């Protein structure tokens, strides 16, 4: 066999724990399944990333932005009333909803945007599903004076209209994608087509632990700040490690970010929650670990939803950010090793958790995060009062209020409850 | 044993002709007419027929071939059907046949099953768009063992080291991508195409076909001045899209390809 010697990280680069192998594999998952034209830019990215990763100046610059611009560390809040109602373990919430722009996506967007600047790329393209990654990317580009184009499925533009306006106000161009299922997967296809055409000046800022190596590693590393903070915060707050750490899994970046802090704590259960949609029937969910099989999608070998001929199955979730047919390759590996477990909750269960956390805790969580909350509620209810469950509250739910309202919630109280307050005066 | 593809290029060089490689999506607009189109392409003188496998997520393709994939999928097309289609027309066509696909349909079928079925259908070569040489190892061996030529794409961004590796691993011919970007017809042949072909020539005697963006007889003639063959895809697929509902579909396709072929004959051939 011919060996190709372009894959090794440069001498001196830190090869961190749980890094994929030199070809980007986590076990048998990952790799680099890209068209030939993208091989060179992906290698250029890998080289630049490994240099930046072990460069003090780069890390300091990012840390200072995270502190002073994003508002890190984000707090850990105890959900006192909700825990009481459930009557089980104490629920702690890692508040990524309080990060600037309202979700964890900013941690990765800033890291990669700084890398783009270092690489001399002045134009950034990105895909977005829920719009949070698009908003985070548009924000980072405004801050660092980069041109920004965001691809978004036409269906997602309708259901996450608030974030479309935010991106445009931040100076980004938002391009609708009408192909395929008109959601996140199709937006990634279009962003990759743009990248392959404009590689000279364009950086592809991928929003989750997906795509060809080094993206799954790099995005995890930029998100690992969540778990590093959370572990210390939980220990300081309750003096013990959580029994379980729970996060929703779209591509899986917020989940890997928080899991990363606890992977070596073998007694801490790591649980990822996928979108069960409205039924576990082809096309009606995005629970890759429930019905998926191994395949290749958009640059990586992982667990995907596909039909008998290897075509990608349509997906559905009330949460646009979870509505995607592939899961990050490292999750597939953690699952095979038994280090993390995966489950799913339905649209309705997520909605119920959204409403409960709003009323009992005064927090409107993103519908994506509501999936994690729904399962955390079930886990906590079965544990003792002295146990602790940590949930990654990955984002805020302002973007979702229209969806929730359309399902009949948030209307003014009806007549039987007495006249509306305006009429009393 | 030399392959049918190798024979095609030996003949082209002997005749000082530029080869014409045509791309259509298998099953577009439906299986029956797709079979007629393949026969028509052969009659019109195409030297190699590339048959695309319809796929839900063709991320290296521009809008024209994306739409072709959608039409073929809607008509029930898939990898299995594309191999059936090739088996059906194989005895009627002189041209070499190359399957052009994304990796996932092959992985889903299983590499061994794919190689066996493709060989039985009379497939001569296979080109997997999103399977660069680093990922192609065991797949390449399996298809070579089945007597099918693995064909690799090379791009203006490909380093000389990788061109050398692809030349060692590839069989039949190498496919030079004329420009950065996705598939789609353009008004002119990209300026970097010739430089890429010269870099390939410097390291290997394998024939080189150049594609992406070619649509006119003069493109074929121009490419023929420095490459062994020209690939025409999106422009041909566009003819199929426009004529899909016409009874003259196949004759229109044949006429278009015959025009390209005249461009190929006008080309001064290299060797
Ligand atoms: C708030 C929020 N949480 C989670 C996700 C899912 O992404 P990931 O699984 O990469 O964290 C998204 C994606 O848009 C999101 O906006």
Image (spheres, coloured by chain):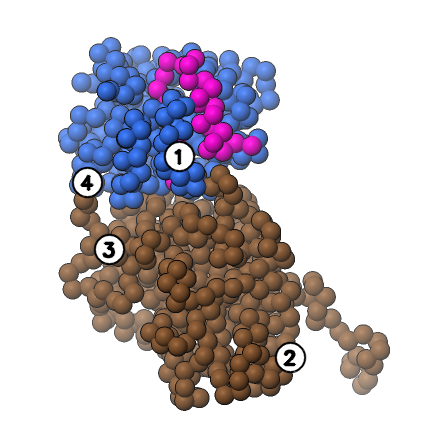
Q: Is residue A135 above or below residue B126?
A: below
- N-term mark: 4 or 2: 4
> Spatial distance from mark 4 to mark 2, Cα to Cα?
62 Å
Q: Which residues are magenta?
A: B76-103
- Please, what secondary structure does the residue beneath circle 2 have? helix
Q: Is residue A98 above or below residue A150?
A: below
Q: Position of residue A18 (x, y in %)?
A: 29, 65
Q: Residue at x 54, y 55 (%)?
A: A286
In the picture, which quadrant includes the N terminus of chain B? top left
Which of the pair A253/B110 is nearer the observer?
A: B110
Whether residue A275 can be seen here: yes
Label 4 or label 3, whichever comes before in sequence order: 4
- The crowding category of the residue bearing disc 3, from other C-alpha atoms within 10 Å (few below 14, some 14 to 19, many at least 20), is some
Q: How crowded is the residue under tag 1: few (<14 C-alpha within 10 Å), some, or many (20+)? A: some
Q: CA distance from mark 4 to mark 1?
A: 23 Å
In the image shown, does A271 or B19 lie closer to the viewer? A271
Residue corresponding to mark 1: B113
The tint chain A carries is brown
**Residue found at the very far right of the displayed protein:** A416
Where residue A120 appears, as percent x and y from the top left, is: 27, 56
User: Which residue appears at 20% of the width and 49% of the height?
Assistant: A6
Q: Chain of mark 2?
A: A
Q: Tell me whether marks 4 and 2 sit on the same chain.
A: yes
Residue A314 among those drawn in magenta: no
Marks 3 and 1, how far apart in space? Answer: 30 Å
SS of the residue under disc 1: helix
* Mark sitting earlier along the chain (2/3): 3
- Residue at image mark 2: A359
The residue that label 4 is drawn on is A1
Q: Residue A22 got which mark?
A: 3
């Amino acid at each position: 066999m011919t060996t190709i010697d372009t894959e090794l990280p440069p001498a001196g680069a830190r090869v961190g724990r749980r890094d994929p192998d030199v070809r980007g594999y986590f076990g048998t998952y990952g790799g680099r399944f890209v068209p030939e034209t993208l091989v060179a830019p992906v290698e250029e990215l890998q080289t630049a990333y490994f240099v930046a990763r072990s460069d003090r100046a780069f890390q300091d610059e990012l840390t200072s932005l995270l502190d002073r611009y994003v508002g890190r560390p984000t707090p850990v809040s105890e959900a006192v009333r909700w825990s009481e109602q459930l009557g089980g373990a104490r629920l702690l919430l890692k508040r990524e909803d309080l990060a600037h722009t309202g979700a964890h996506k900013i941690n990765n967007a800033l890291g990669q945007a700084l890398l783009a600047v270092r690489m001399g790329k002045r134009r950034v393209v990105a895909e977005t599903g829920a719009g949070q990654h698009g908003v985070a990317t548009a924000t980072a580009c405004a801050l660092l004076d980069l041109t920004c184009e965001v691809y978004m499925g036409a269906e997602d533009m309708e259901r996450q209209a608030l974030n479309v306006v935010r991106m445009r106000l931040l100076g980004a161009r938002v391009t609708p994608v009408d192909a395929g299922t008109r959601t996140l997967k199709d937006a990634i296809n279009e962003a990759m087509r743009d990248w392959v055409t404009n590689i000279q000046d364009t950086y592809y800022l991928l929003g989750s632990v997906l795509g060809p190596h080094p993206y799954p590693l790099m995005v995890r590393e930029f998100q690992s700040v969540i778990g590093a903070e959370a572990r210390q915060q939980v220990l300081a707050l309750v003096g013990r490690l959580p029994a379980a750490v729970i996060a929703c899994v779209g591509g899986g970046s917020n989940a890997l970010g928080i899991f990363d802090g606890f992977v070596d704590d073998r007694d801490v259960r790591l649980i990822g929650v996928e979108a069960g949609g409205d039924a576990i029937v082809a096309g009606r969910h995005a629970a890759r670990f429930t019905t998926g099989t191994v395949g290749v999608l958009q640059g990586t070998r992982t667990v995907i939803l596909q039909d008998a001929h290897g075509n990608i199955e349509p997906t559905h979730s009330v949460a646009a950010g979870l509505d995607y047919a592939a899961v990050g390759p490292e999750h597939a590996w953690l699952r095979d090793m038994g280090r993390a477990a995966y489950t799913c909750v339905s649209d309705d269960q997520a909605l119920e958790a959204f409403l409960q956390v709003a009323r009992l805790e005064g927090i409107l969580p993103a519908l994506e995060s509501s999936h994690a909350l729904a399962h955390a509620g079930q886990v906590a209810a079965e544990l003792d009062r002295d146990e602790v469950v940590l949930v990654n509250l990955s984002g805020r739910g302002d973007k979702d209020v229209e969806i929730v309202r359309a399902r009949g919630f948030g209307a003014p109280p009806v007549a039987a409850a007495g006249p509306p307050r305006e009429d009393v005066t | 044993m030399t392959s049918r593809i190798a024979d095609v290029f030996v003949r082209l060089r002997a005749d000082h002709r530029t080869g014409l490689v045509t791309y259509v999506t298998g099953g577009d607009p439906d299986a029956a007419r797709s079979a007629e189109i393949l026969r028509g392409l052969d009659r019109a003188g195409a030297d190699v027929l590339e048959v695309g496998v319809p796929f839900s997520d063709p991320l290296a393709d521009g809008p024209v071939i994306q739409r072709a994939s959608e039409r073929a999928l809607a008509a029930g097309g898939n990898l299995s059907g594309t191999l059936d289609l090739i088996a059906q027309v194989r005895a009627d066509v002189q041209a070499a046949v190359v399957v052009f696909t994304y990796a996932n349909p092959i992985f889903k079928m299983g590499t061994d099953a794919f190689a066996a079925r493709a060989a039985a259908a009379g497939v001569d070569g296979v080109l997997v768009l999103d399977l660069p040489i680093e990922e192609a190892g065991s797949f390449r061996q399996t298809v070579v063992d089945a007597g099918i030529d693995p064909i690799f794409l090379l791009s203006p961004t490909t380093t000389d080291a990788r061109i050398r590796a692809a030349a060692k691993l590839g069989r039949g011919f190498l496919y030079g991508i004329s420009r950065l970007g996705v598939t789609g017809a353009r008004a002119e042949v990209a300026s970097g195409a010739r430089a890429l072909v010269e870099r390939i020539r410097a390291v290997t005697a394998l024939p080189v076909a150049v594609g992406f963006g070619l649509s006119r007889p003069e493109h074929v003639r121009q490419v023929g001045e420095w490459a062994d063959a020209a690939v025409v895809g999106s422009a041909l697929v566009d003819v199929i899209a426009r004529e899909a509902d016409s009874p003259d579909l196949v004759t229109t396709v044949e006429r278009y390809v015959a025009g390209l072929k005249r461009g190929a004959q006008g080309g001064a051939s290299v060797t």
